[in-house]
Image (cartoon, grey):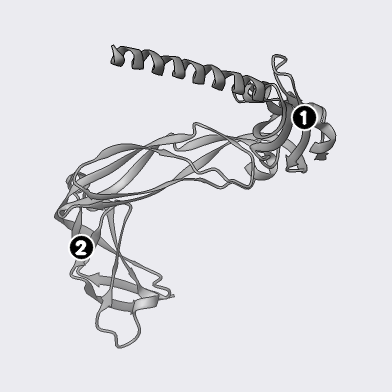
Amino acid sequence: MKTATSQKSYKAHAGVLLLALVFWFMVKMSKDYDYTLEIPLKVTITNEEVCLKYPPPDDIVVEFTGRGIDLLQLNFYQPAYEIDLSEERGKLVLNLSEHREYVRVSDDVSVQVKSIVRPHEIEFELDQRLSRKVPVKVDAEVKTDNGFIWVGSVVEPDSVLVSGPATYVDSLRHLHSEKKIYQKVRMAFHDKMHLLKDEQFYGDYLPEKVEVFYDVQRLGEKEISEVPVKVINTGNYQVVPLPSKVKVYVKGGEKILAEAGAEDFEVEIDFDKEWQPGTEEVRATVKTKLNISYVESRPAKFQVLVQKKRN
């Protein structure tokens, strides 16, 4: 019986305490307070021919005054500082403290704006809107496992539509992606990469990320025969290389090498650069448009028969 009585006593005390807390809270919430809140800055421009040149701050800090219960509701009704620049041209320096009416608050909340804490002033600059496609440059490094090679990448799309102030868009030569490093890769793969935006200027990218195909192949080697030797910059001489055709040794991706032939390589001797009277052998340069890791001609040096041209 004592235990039951004690439990009833605890419940009664808890009920009284809860009522006291509710009463205290209601009294406190009915009093007036000042409350500082960070709210978003929203800029409206209905004229599609112009846009902001530089991004404005995302938020401003405002001091409100009102009953505690109303100030508490501010966090749920999402007030904002709203500016309409549709009729503006060029530059506008706005003193936020002089335009507290731009703070939009729901009619269901009875609070007043006491002051704009920061920033006190914002400079808006408008520019002609320009849209054009800009090439994408992927900033990635693919480190392959032993026996494999990264032979190239394909970006989709390879250019992105940039819309923003003409001053900024005209200056763009390419867009950079985020930087990524891939380790011990053994096969080709796809990945999506976000494009980096210039924080100094305002601009919209469409799309904001690209898909990249990284072509990783097994490393192979191949010897290609019957590649002609070409002599350039002969001036007033007739020059015959010995031998006139050579083998080319190549290392690269196995799929690339499988399709490679003699027509994909040029063995070139720069006569004016490599030869002078008394020279017995000259070096050649191997040129190709294929994406390979290593190439050499066999032999690497050549004898040349040199004779002056007759008038």
**Residue 190, disc:** none
Residue 256 location (% of width, % of height): 22, 46
Q: Is residue 144 visible?
A: yes
**Crowdedness of circle 2 by 10 Å Cα count: few (<14), some, many (20+)?**
some
**Crowdedness of circle 1 by 10 Å Cα count: few (<14), some, many (20+)?**
some
Q: Residue at x 73, y 36 (%)?
A: 128
- Badge 1 is on which residue? 113
Above or below: residue 107 compared with residue 32: above
Q: Is residue 44 visible?
A: no
Residue 209 location (% of width, % of height): 45, 35
**Residue 245, disc:** 2
Q: Which numbered disc, 1 or 2, marks the residue that appears first in the sequence?
A: 1
Q: Quadrant of the N terminus?
A: top left
Q: Quadrant of the C terminus?
A: bottom left
Above or below: residue 231 compared with residue 105: below
Looking at the image, residue 305 sits to the left or right of residue 29; the answer is left
Q: Which of the pair 251/132 is nearer the observer?
A: 132
Above or below: residue 132 compared with residue 26: below
Q: Residue at x 31, y 73 (%)?
A: 239
Q: Residue at x 40, y 18 (%)?
A: 10
Residue 130 location (% of width, % of height): 67, 35
